[in-house]
Image: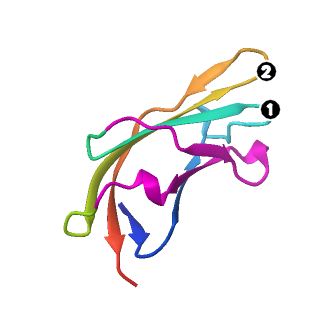
Amino acid sequence: MAHAIVQADNKFFIDLYCKEEDGTARDLTGATLAAAMRINGGTVFNPSVAALGDAVDGVARVTLLATHIPADTNNVYGPFELQITATWPDGTVKSSSVFRDRIQQKIR
């Protein structure tokens, strides 16, 4: 599934659902979240990421700004790779697997 950027939007969100091995939500309460992303094989950058809604539900929202999106080529921005890392106050660190998908432009 390609994620679409709507023409003239200035933000783009990707919501990731963090789960334990048994499939239950990973509680993000108190965790500091960080994201690393690369679009179209370019330079790795660090978009903002934060727990969305109630942190116990384990949903992390990554926010891309217009400045993160590379110049458009035929309305297809290409593949991206995204990984988030959560660090809790007790020193526990968990990193997601690398999420890979495509971004394309959608004209309104």
Q: Which mark, residue 30?
A: 1
Q: Secondary structure at mark 1?
A: loop
- In this orientation, which residue lies closer to the viewer: 65 or 31? 65
From the image, which quarter does the N terminus lie in? bottom left
Q: Quadrant of residue 38?
A: top left
Q: Amino acid at mark 2?
A: Pro
Q: In percent of the image, x 29 and y 40: which residue is there?
A: 42
Magenta segment range?
43-71
Query: What residue is disc 2 on?
Result: 89
Q: Is residue 19 magenta?
A: no
Q: Is residue 54 magenta?
A: yes
Looking at the image, is 24 positioned above or below residue 74? above
Residue 99 falls left or right of residue 86: left
Q: Position of residue 37 (x, y in %)?
A: 43, 40
Q: Secondary structure at mark 2?
A: loop
Q: In percent of the image, x 73 and y 37: which residue is there?
A: 28
What whole-number distance in Å separates the C-alpha atoms at marks 2 and 1? 7 Å
Q: Earlier in the sequence, mark 2 or mark 1?
A: 1
Q: Amino acid at mark 1?
A: Gly
Mark 2: few/some/many CA within 10 Å (<14, 14-19, 20+): few
Query: Are the two marked residues, 2 and 1, in contact with CB atoms closer than 8 angstroms?
Result: yes
